[in-house]
Image (cartoon, rainbow, N blue to C red):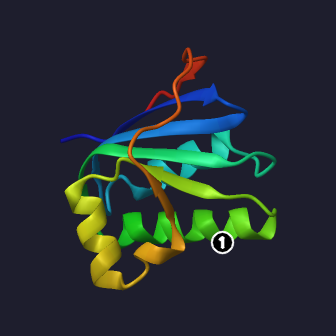
Amino acid sequence: MDYTSTVRHAAGRVVLTAAGDVDLAAHGRFQADIDQVWDGSTDLVLDCSQITFLDSMGLRVLVTTIQRADEHGRKVTLAAPSQPVVRVLDLAGIREMFTEVETAPEDVPDSDTAS
């Protein structure tokens, strides 16, 4: 499944919803989407409920993002991580690095990324 993403703002946070495969072919777009919509000045919610595959390159994007958040004193929350995401986080032994919630905060979308 091709990677896509959408972005919106809710409860003072940036919410990026990623869908499809986040793999070697798509990780650059995933990172670029995050960089385009999140400057580190707010908390970030990554809605991972629609990610169908995550490989080590997608994992790298998640780790880089949480490191960037830490540098800015911000938090990255994974909303409804899909089973493929949970599996990779567990295999890597880093699931505890992320805060997880069952659903992303709701609000009206304010823009879409063209990925």
Task: Tell me what residue is drawn at x 47 percent, y 37 percent.
Answer: 104
Percent x, y of residue 89: 35, 73
Q: Position of residue 29 (x, y in %)?
A: 46, 48
What is the quadrant of residue 20 in the picture? top left
User: Between 9 and 60, which is closer to the camera in this rendering?
Assistant: 9
Query: Left or right of 31: which side holds 41?
Result: right
Mark 1 surroundings: few (<14), some (14-19) or many (≥20) residues within 10 A = some
Quarter in which the C terminus is drawn = top left
Quarter of image, res 55: bottom left
Check the image and report above or below for 96 versus 107. below
Q: Is residue 4 left or right of residue 37?
A: left
Q: Residue furthest front?
A: 102
Give the labeled residue for mark 1: 67
Taking 41 as reference, is 34 left or right?
Answer: left
* Above or below, 59 relative to 35: below
Q: Looking at the rendering, in which quadrant would you find the N terminus?
A: top left
Between 18 and 91, the one lying in front of the other is: 91
In the image, what residue occupies the spot 79% across and 70% down? Answer: 71
- Compared with 13, 41 (above or below) is below
Numbered label tally: 1
Left or right: 56, with 6 as reference point: left
Tell me residue 111's x, y (percent). 58, 19
For the point 43% across and 80% down, which residue is it? 94
Which amino acid type is shown beneath numbered disc 1? Gln
Q: What element does badge 1 sit on?
A: helix
Tell me residue 47's x, y (percent). 43, 43
Is 48 located above or below residue 59 in the figure? above
Residue under the point 55% across and 43% down: 33
User: Which image quadrant is residue 59 in?
Assistant: bottom left
